[in-house]
Image: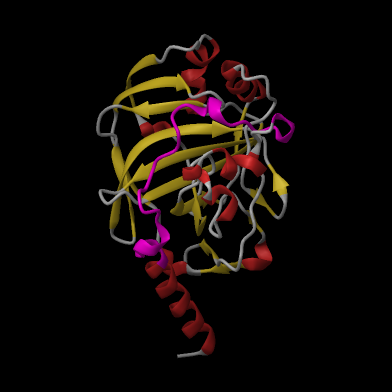
Amino acid sequence: MTSLSLSKSLSFLLLLILCSSPVLHADDPKEEVDDEHQFTYEEKSGKGPKRWGKLKAEWKVCNTGKLQSPIDLLHERVQVLPDLGKLKRDYKPAPAILKSRGHDIMVHWKGYAGQININGTYYKLLQCHWHSPSEHTINEKRFDLELHVVHQAHDGRVAVIGILYKLGRPDPLLSKLLPLIKSLGEEERDLGILNPGDIKFGSRKYYRYIGSLTIPPCTEGVTWTVVKKVRTASREQVRALRDAVNDGFEENSRPTQGLDGRPIWLYTKRP
């Protein structure tokens, strides 16, 4: 075995360990907060990202953690790892609701909406929500929008798929939701049966790393998959997502966090 092959094999083994290791998870794993009014994205408010870890004891990892998200996906740090394999998703149409959590708009599936498979672990689809501008950056470039598709395994482990958008043609899922987003108030809206298959990835290439939730409680041990291809959404769609929240802020994106020596992998099929 060549030194390069050995290095990639060790990298893949490390990824398997990181994705399954219980030491990466909080003692009491928690999902993202459902009411976001307790924090903001503006530092001068006293409740901005730099102070999240001081607002509540259970949020302290937001400031002290070493596996925080989002990050800059800097290409000189990325290791190509074909052994990651294709992203396996099996989504199903299911009842869903649309709601504002305070700083973002979320679609929450009330029924079983399918799952993804990462290294043999199945993660059930829970919800998706949007951040603008994007939270993850590529080579320090920030995009206009980012969709987070949140999944959870039976043992509480979380896996999130991130999809980046630039301004351009309308996004199909947002096109379906736009009338309801524009009229959304404080009350949640019933979407009926919504097919998560309407979430378009657009590429089989993706980045993978171990990070955290990007809003409090910033729980670590999250398996992140960020789709490499940047998709498009219209200016109207991006604006509607911010206007619907009506929180007085122009953005809802956490700044990128330090990598602290973490590896970043890129899946692309073998030549």
The answer to whether residue 139 is visible is yes
From the image, which quarter does the N terminus lie in? bottom left
Residue toward you, 195 or 259: 259
Q: Quadrant of residue 145?
A: top right
Where is residue 161? Give x, y as percent: 46, 46
Whether residue 125 is situated above or below residue 77 in the rendered picture: above
Residue at the (40%, 49%) spot, across then down: 159
Whether residue 194 is situated above or below residue 155 in the rendered picture: above
Residue at the (51%, 21%) spot, across then down: 175
Whether residue 193 is situated above or below residue 46 in the rendered picture: above
Residue toward you, 35 or 136: 35
Residue 14 inside the magenta-drawn segment = no
Whether residue 257 is situated above or below residue 147 in the rendered picture: below
Where is residue 34? Give x, y as percent: 43, 29
The answer to whether residue 254 is visible is no
Report the magenta residues as a range.
18-45
Say left or right for 177 vs 113. Answer: right
Residue 37 inside the magenta-drawn segment = yes
Say left or right for 128 vs 134. Answer: left
Say left or right for 259 vs 183. Answer: right
Where is residue 189? Give x, y as percent: 40, 14
Question: How is the protein colored in the picture?
Answer: secondary structure
Residue at the (42%, 60%) spot, across then down: 24
Q: Quadrant of residue 30?
A: top left
Q: How many marks?
A: 0
Where is residue 70? Give x, y as percent: 59, 49
Residue toward you, 266 or 36: 36
Q: Quadrant of residue 120?
A: bottom left
Residue at the (54%, 32%) spot, across then down: 130
Residue toward you, 241 or 205: 241
